[in-house]
Image: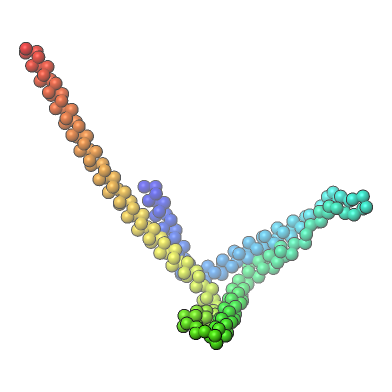
Amino acid sequence: MKALQSSYFRSICAIIVGILLIQYRQEMMHWLMIAIGIIFLISGLISVVSYYSAIKHQDEDIQVFDSNGNLIINRKPTFPIVGIGSLILGGILTVMPSTFIIGLMYILASILILGAINMFANLASANKFAQIGLFWWIIPSIILLIGIFIMVNPLESAETPLVIIGWSMLLYGVIECINAIKIHQIKRTFANQHATPTTTSSAEDTHKNSNREQKTNEELLEKDFE
């Protein structure tokens, strides 16, 4: 019963998440970018604070020199380039999430379009030496169309993965619920089928034992009469 309740809980959570992703995909994308930006901000801030804290206590560190006066060990902290980059990226994601998404989609679309054009050029060059099948021309055409679609509709393209994930979560939740019900019914039927023969055998054993006791009593009575 606990396993059934756990399956119901998982399926209900999956259905709720799926519906939210499908219905509010644009808001989900917006807040997802803000959440990622906050994570980058915190990471960069910790890195920068750690650097300045190490600089402040640098004089307290021990420095080791060799016999010629050359510095062997210096615990001077490394400048946090990655931390500052995380701060800048986190600020952009937090303040301008939609702008960042659109810019990212344009970059990805440009990469796809240029990649498709390069594939066409390579196929055209190879076609001079051998016959290229139709399938190999279809693939770069699909990539080119996807790149153009992303370039024309950047926000919708960014929301598409969330829609796919949402429908997948919804399908998982429904199938999980149906499977839980079916498995519970199968287990209950199996238990009932194996419980019935046991009960029957127990009744037969009881009947045999009572017959034996009756025969024993009759034999004792016959001996008494003799």
Q: Residue furthest left?
A: 225
Q: Is residue 223 above or below residue 182?
A: above
Q: Quadrant of residue 198?
A: top left
Residue 158 percent location from the top left of the image: 54, 73
Q: Is residue 135 above or below residue 18?
A: below
Q: Residue furthest bottom?
A: 128
Residue 58 percent location from the top left of the image: 83, 53
Q: Residue furthest front?
A: 129
Q: Quadrant of residue 114?
A: bottom right
Q: Nearer the viewer, residue 88 or 219?
A: 219
Indicate left or right for 44 with 159 as reference.
right
Residue 87 percent location from the top left of the image: 69, 65
Q: Dividing the image into 4 quarters, which one contains the C terminus?
A: top left
Q: Residue furthest right?
A: 68
Q: Is residue 147 above or below residue 186?
A: below
- The residue positioned 12% from the left and 17% from the top of the image is 220
Residue 59 seen:
no
Residue 139 seen:
yes
Q: How many marks?
A: 0
- The residue positioned 65% from the left and 70% from the top of the image is 92
Indicate left or right for 181 with 73 as reference.
left
- The residue positioned 57% from the left and 82% from the top of the image is 122
Q: Is residue 137 above or below residue 73?
A: below
The colouring scheme, among rainbow, by chain, secondary structure or one colour, is rainbow
